[in-house]
Amino acid sequence: MTQNGQVEIHPLAYVHPKAELGVGVTVGPFAVIEEHVKIGDNSIIHTHGIVRSYTTMGKECVVHPHAVVGDIAQDFKYKGERSYTEIGDNCTFREGSTVHRGTTEDSVTKLGNRVYMMAQAHVAHNCIVGDRVLLVNGSALGGYVEVAECAFVSAFVGVHQFSKIGAYSLIAADTKIDLDVPPFVIIDGYPRAICKLNRIGMERNGFTKEDADLIESAYVAISKAEHPMAAGRELASAENPLLRRIGEFYQHSARGVIHRFNFAGE
């Protein structure tokens, strides 16, 4: 490796002279870092990793071989407009994963902190991905998808453009998502349905059994309602903040929330 101050750049890497690399950044052989890129302290761009123009990446991120961060949008409407990719701290991009920048002038694709993209996972243009989201191998987010914090998107899940994935939810492998996924639930089955509460995920993130029981009761009531969307929206005025969060999710859903339930509680 050759050293430039406190940055280590392999002589076979390409780093644009105007790219800004933080302290302790390591760039491996055949990696590419283009112009208008900022990479935070102690990040690692492994061999054949690519960070494309107009990308800002936080500290302690890792780009594995053949991952591409900040490529242009896969959108026929894209005509070369300047758009951006913003990556938080401690994000990991495993082999072959891809993130595309926004498709319209000055628009942004944004990932929060501690996002982990496994091999071949994809985040399309203009997505917003919250903190501590896990995208498992081969999962794909269409354009303008929003994923709230601590959601778990399993292998080979396809998420339709403009869909929303609620916080602390889990989508089982090979599931097609074409409506919004509300918070705290597990989506599974053929056809896909809200099948139960994500109790394990909630417990891992500090929720109590009482929290989970309350949320489960709310979803059981929604599942039994004649009009589940209306029943969900009513929770927006609930006193409990967790129930309000569910209600606000239903209120702000433009595509509609998955309304098929296979939900009997536990």
Image: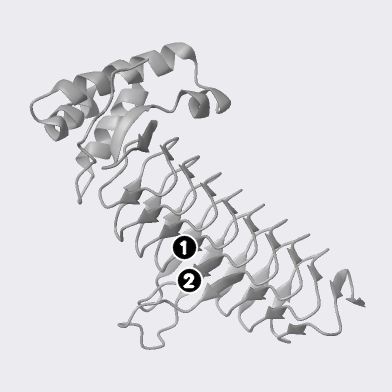
**Percent of width and height locating residue 214:** 35, 15
The kind of secondary structure element at disc 2 is strand
Q: Which dot marks residue 100?
A: 2
**Earlier-in-chain disc, 2 versus 1:** 2
Looking at the picture, does residue 159 appear above or below residue 72? above
**Percent of width and height locating residue 109:** 45, 65
Q: Is residue 13 left or right of residue 131?
A: right
> Residue visible at 23% across and 29% down?
236
Looking at the picture, does residue 216 appear above or below residue 68? above
Furthest-left residue in this view: 226
**Percent of width and height locating residue 119:** 60, 59
Q: Amino acid at mark 2?
A: His
Looking at the picture, does residue 260 appear above or below residue 135? above
Residue receiving disc 1: 123
Q: Is residue 91 left or right of residue 122?
A: right
> Residue visible at 54% across and 68% down?
98
Image quarter of the N terminus: bottom right
Q: Are marks 2 and 1 in contact (CB under 8 Å)?
A: yes
Q: Is residue 245 left or right of residue 234?
A: right
Q: Is residue 244 left or right of residue 12?
A: left
- Look at the image and tell me whether residue 245 can be seen: no
